Image (tube, grey):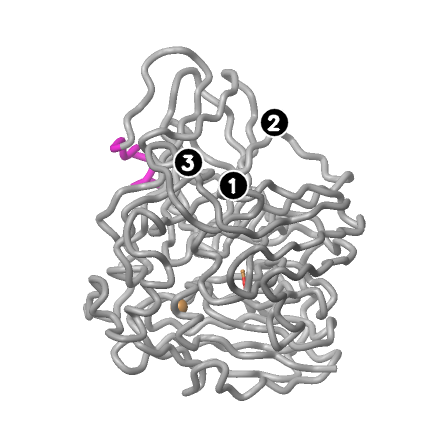
């Protein structure tokens, strides 16, 4: 699979608004890359941005030198330069890619990466990729302005509540999932005013591959009139579970299958904990009136997926094994939200987590802040710690306010790997560190 990928300023039509932003080959999201597991991917990045950039292949256990983290795995790709990313696709699933420089991701530089598994039985008739995204650029302050504002004033930029630490099951991520009020939310690059439409037929089994590429927003997702069977989390198969609604944090992916009803149904992604506009699309299998963008289907208040409901399928469990090493990650806010820390430090000031190849490592993440953090580990898929070795496999996991959560991984892919919060603002304000072994 060969492709060129040109990162450049672009004028993009979001449906209802035309914006000046940065994009891959002129579209937001960029055109998906689809290939088969075991294929070699060769992507020539052309940097026509006014800033340096890189590409990170989110969720893949790939070669360290292709991971796209500036000064950690490669030098930046300067304006006017090119760089060839070349590696074998190690495992199937739903992924995405984005720069790992500043908040470029939040300008619209991101696209799905779908790695097919030819041996998967796949009990569905068709599939649709849905990219959920929040949007400031061109509709309000741009992402870099937001970041500058946060650096200056911390959380006074937005409406973060200093409310209690207790986790409310109806609002598990806390009172506010982010710092910034977003004027728009996108599903597949479309604002709610001109929504993306999924055309299907009654009774068809539709697989949705969902990616949350937002910089700052977790979404509560539902499809009016439908229950969803969750089949994959972060690319890895799970034992199927039926739910009405699920929360998808920044950097997480879910695959679900639904049996399409007869009519036109709202597909809704509501910013979790924010009283805000929502991402909106339509599933249409018959003519007739479309639902309106302010529709809030009853499913949003129905059975909510929790990590505890999910278990990996037989082939993808991390074998039961006692951890050789436990590494604590203390997640904290400092300076009124101007800095976000791991173990008291803001990246690039950090203490690399020193582990040895071959070890089973347990990361114990304690969230001592009032906001949730979708924590992401590069180069590995961890398992939620579980004595029986039945822990859910993921690469990005929401650590709730006040929560302590443990995940295990095998140190089987040597290199320098970032672990960080996938709220890109928290990450850029310091909530990143490096796991390192040779
Ligand atoms: Cu999408 Cu460092 O990750
Ligand atoms: Cu965070």
Residue 223 placement (x, y as % from top left)? 40, 33
Which circle's residue, 3 or 2, is located before the other in the chain?
A: 3
For the point 37% across and 59% down, the residue is 143
Picture quarter with the N terminus: top right
For the point 52% across and 61% down, the residue is 396
295 within the magenta span: yes
Residue 121 placement (x, y as % from top left)? 72, 35
**Mark number, residue 27:** 1
Label 3 neighbour load within 10 Å: few <14, some 14-19, many 20+: some
Label 2 neighbour load within 10 Å: few <14, some 14-19, many 20+: few
Q: Do the residues labelled 1 and 2 touch (CB within 8 Å)?
A: no
Residue 8 placement (x, y as % from top left)? 54, 51
Q: Can I make out residue 388 in this image? A: no
Between circles 3 and 2, the one closer to the viewer is: 3
For the point 28% across and 71% down, the residue is 370
Quadrant of picture, ligand 1: bottom right
Foreground residue, 120 or 140? Answer: 140
Q: Give the range drawn in magenta.
A: 294-302
Q: Distance between the residues labelled 3 and 1?
A: 8 Å
Count of marks placed on residues: 3
Q: Can I make out residue 82 in this image? A: yes
Label 1 neighbour load within 10 Å: few <14, some 14-19, many 20+: many
202 within the magenta span: no
**Mark number, residue 126:** 2
Q: How far apart are marks 3 and 2 (CA)?
A: 27 Å
Residue 139 position (above or below residue 250): above
**Mark number, residue 13:** 3
Which residue is farthest top?
A: 287
For the point 27% across and 75% down, the residue is 152
């Amino acid at each position: 699979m060969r492709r060129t990928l040109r990162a450049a300023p672009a004028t993009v039509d979001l449906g209802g608004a035309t914006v000046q932003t940065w994009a891959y080959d002129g579209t937001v999201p960029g055109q998906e890359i689809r290939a088969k597991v075991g294929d070699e991917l060769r992507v020539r990045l052309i940097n026509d941005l006014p800033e340096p950039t890189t590409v990170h292949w989110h969720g893949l256990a790939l070669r360290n030198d292709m991971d796209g983290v500036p000064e950690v795995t490669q030098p930046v790709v300067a304006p006017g330069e090119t760089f060839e990313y070349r590696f074998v696709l190690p495992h199937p699933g739903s992924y995405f890619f984005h720069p790992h420089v500043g908040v470029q991701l939040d300008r619209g530089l991101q696209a799905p990466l779908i790695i097919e598994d030819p041996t998967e039985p796949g009990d569905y008739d068709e599939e649709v990729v849905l990219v959920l995204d929040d949007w400031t650029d061109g509709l309000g302050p741009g992402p870099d302005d937001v970041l500058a504002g946060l650096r200056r004033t911390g959380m006074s930029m937005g409406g973060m509540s200093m409310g209690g630490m207790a986790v409310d099951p109806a609002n598990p991520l806390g009172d506010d999932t982010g710092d910034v009020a977003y004027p728009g939310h996108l599903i597949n690059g479309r604002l709610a005013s001109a929504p993306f439409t999924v055309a299907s037929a009654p009774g068809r089994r539709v697989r949705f591959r969902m990616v949350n590429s937002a910089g700052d927003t977790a979404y509560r997702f539902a499809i009016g009139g439908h229950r969803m069977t969750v089949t994959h989390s972060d690319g890895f198969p799970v034992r199927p579970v039926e739910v009405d609604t699920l929360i998808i944090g920044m950097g997480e992916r879910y695959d679900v299958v639904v049996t399409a009803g007869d009519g036109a149904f709202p597909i809704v992604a509501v910013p979790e904990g924010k009283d805000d506009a929502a991402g909106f699309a339509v599933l249409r299998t018959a003519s007739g009136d479309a639902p309106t963008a302010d529709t809030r289907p009853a499913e949003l208040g129905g059975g909510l997926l929790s990590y505890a409901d999910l278990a990996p399928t037989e082939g993808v469990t991390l074998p039961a094994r006692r951890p050789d090493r436990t590494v604590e990650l203390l997640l904290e806010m400092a300076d009124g939200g101007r800095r976000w820390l791991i173990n008291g430090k803001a990246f690039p000031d950090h203490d690399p987590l020193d582990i040895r190849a071959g070890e089973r490592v347990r990361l114990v993440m304690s969230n001592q802040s009032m906001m949730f953090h979708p924590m992401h580990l590069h180069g590995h898929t961890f398992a939620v710690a579980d004595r029986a070795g039945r822990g859910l496999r993921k690469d990005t996991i929401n650590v709730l306010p006040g929560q302590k959560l443990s995940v295990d991984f095998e140190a089987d892919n040597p290199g320098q790997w970032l672990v960080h919060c996938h709220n890109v603002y928290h990450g850029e304000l310091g909530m990143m560190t490096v796991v390192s072994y040779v």
